[in-house]
Amino acid sequence: MDYALTIALAVAFCAVASLYASVGHGGASGYLAVMALAGMAPAVMRPAALGLNLAVAGLAAVAFARAGYFRWRLFWPFAATSIPFAWLGGGASVSDAWFRLLVGGALFVAALRFFLPAPASNVAPRAPPVALALWIGVVLGYLSGLVGVGGGIFLTPLLLLAGWARPKEAAAVSAPFIFVNSLAGLIGLMPAATLHPPTFGLWIAATLVGGLLGARLGSERWPQVRLRQALGAVLLVASTKFVLMVFA
């Protein structure tokens, strides 16, 4: 890979990691968007996005848990079924056309997430039925492994729109959810993964720097409405590019 492109991607990944970690996400959909705009192959994109996701989601999980927002009762039903199905999804083969459609859809969902208004914080959240959460975990886990994301782009808006969590509680639950699903998806994908250690090492370092900054600011205090809307616009562009590539 061209040296200048490698550095440019590292800078972009650092910025994406900072923005995503501030809302409890690992950033996989953002990394996929950047790699899509750079014209990278799906064989490289999926494992790279999951690997970077692990680093940033782990940082975000610790930051939000230390701030007191994590809720075990909300986390475990989704994670219990999502983990094995993320592994299955990671090991599943998918054609380039279907991969682009799935990623385009995932990026579109992620973009909408950043444009959604935050629900009123004075509304007391109610826990979802365990059986329902278990079934949702199955779907989110498989999609996460198949597309190469941790599932936070699906889980966070669901938690907020269903009234199951406040924004920072949703972030605190989504971060470890993303971590375990990214790990399971990467393990399932590993036999066919294509990673270049020197390049990937630089990208990991860049995302760790951005993730540390974003996780700390997001778990404490950071107005970010405009930044999130700008990121949503970038994701919409990447989503459109993916879909158009299918019909090109």
Image (cartoon, helix red, strand yellow):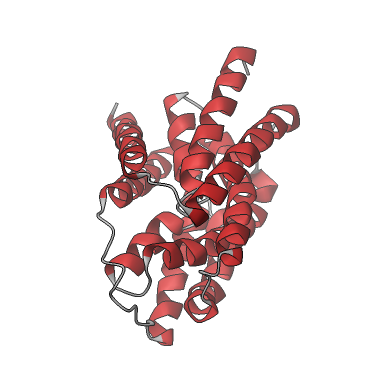
Return the residue nearer the eye: 115 or 63.
63
Q: Is residue 87 visible?
A: no
Residue at image position (45%, 40%) is 30
Residue 45 in which image quadrant: top right
| Picture coordinates of residue 26, whole percent (x, y) | 53, 49
Residue at image position (61%, 65%) is 66
Residue at image position (63%, 33%) is 206
| Picture coordinates of residue 245, whole percent (x, y) | 33, 30
Q: Vertical placement of 41 versus 61: above or below?
A: above
Q: Is residue 197 visible?
A: yes
Q: Would residue 135 appear left or right of 76 to someone viewing this image?
A: left
Return the residue nearer the eye: 85 or 17.
17
Return the residue nearer the eye: 112 or 142.
112
Task: Give the residue at the far front of this rendering.
Answer: 221
Q: How many marks?
A: 0
Return the residue nearer the eye: 220 or 134.
220
| Picture coordinates of residue 199, whole percent (x, y) | 69, 27
Q: Quadrant of the N terminus?
A: top right
Residue at image position (28%, 31%) is 244
Residue 103 in which image quadrant: top left
| Picture coordinates of residue 94, whole percent (x, y) | 47, 47
